Image: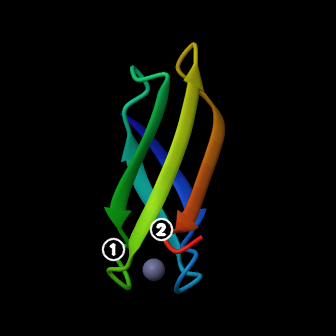
Amino acid sequence: MFEHFFICPYCTEEISMLIDPSLKKQEYIEDCEVCCNPIEITAHFENNDLIFFEASDIDQ
Ligand SMILES: [Zn+2]
């Protein structure tokens, strides 16, 4: 698993999430570990490298 650190779009705390690099393109909802709001995660991998990552609130 690939650990990625980013800023929560709701509480602006730095959090980390484990992402599976075997899935080239993935989009899912995961709750922030600090404020528990649902974050929409978009992650793209190429050769096990994270080439695109976006964390947005689900209302956008
Ligand atoms: Zn948060």
| Residue at figure coordinates x 38%, y 49% from the top left | 28
Q: Which residue is mark 1?
A: 33
| Residue at figure coordinates x 59%, y 82% from the top left | 12
Examine the image and state in which quarter residue 21 appears. top left
Q: Are marks 2 and 1 in contact (CB under 8 Å)?
A: yes
Q: Amino acid at mark 1?
A: Glu
| Residue at figure coordinates x 61%, y 52% from the top left | 54
> Mark 1: which secondary structure?
loop
Q: Amino acid at mark 2?
A: Ile
Q: Nearer the viewer, residue 42 or 18?
A: 42
Q: Which residue is mark 2?
A: 15
Q: Position of residue 53 (x, y in %)?
A: 62, 45
Query: Quick check: 51 left or right of 55?
Result: right
Q: Position of residue 35 (x, y in %)?
A: 38, 85
Query: So how many labels did they put on this image?
Result: 2
Task: Respond yes or no on whether mark 1 lies under 8 Å from ligand 1.
Answer: yes
Q: CA distance from mark 2 to mark 1?
A: 7 Å
Give the crowd class for mark 1: few <14, some 14-19, many >=20 residues within 10 Å: some
> Mark 2: which secondary structure?
strand
In this rendering, the answer to whether 26 lies above or below 5 is: above
Q: Quadrant of the N terminus?
A: top left
